[in-house]
Amino acid sequence: MTPLFAFGLGWPEIMGILVIVLVLFGAKKVPELMKGLGSGIKEFKKASRDVQEELHRSVEDEPAPTRPAAPQPPTSTVAQAPQDPKS
C-alpha cells in the first residue's frame, strides 16, 4: 500500500491533481517544480538518516555507569560566636 492510498487518494484523484497542477503552472514549469520537490525530499531523507545515525552512535557510545564514590564521614564544624572588637 503506498502512502497516497493511505490518505484515501485513488488513481482518479491523483490524475485530477496532476491535471490541475499542469493547468496552473504550465508544461514548462512542472519539471522544475518536480525537480525542486525531489531534491527537497532527498535532503529531508538525508537529514533524517543523519539524525538516526547520530542517535544510534550516542546509544552505542554511552559510557558504562560508574560506581558512586564511598561516602565521606561527616566532618563536624563548630560555629564560633563573633568576637566583639571592643574587648
Image (cartoon, grey):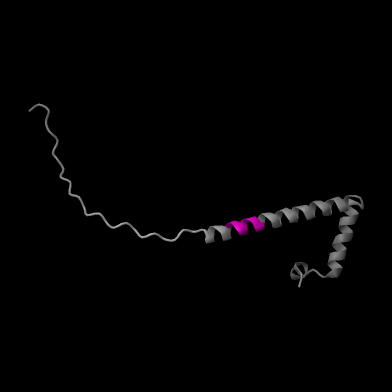
76 or 72: nearer the eye?
Answer: 72
Residue 69 x %, y %: 32, 56
Residue 78: name its quadrant.
top left
Check residue 49 for magenta coloring. Answer: yes
Question: Which is the main secondary structure of the residues drawn in magenta?
Answer: helix
Residue 9 vertical placement versus 75 (above, below): below
Residue 8 vertical placement versus 76 (above, below): below
34 or 67: nearer the eye?
Answer: 67
Left or right of residue 79, residue 45 in this image: right
46 or 9: nearer the eye?
Answer: 46
Q: Looking at this rendering, what residue extends furthest in the left direction?
A: 87
| Magenta residues (range) | 48-54
Q: How many marks?
A: 0
Residue at the location (36% across, 60% down)? 67
Residue 20 x %, y %: 87, 58
Residue at the location (59% across, 56% down)? 54
Check residue 84 for magenta coloring. Answer: no
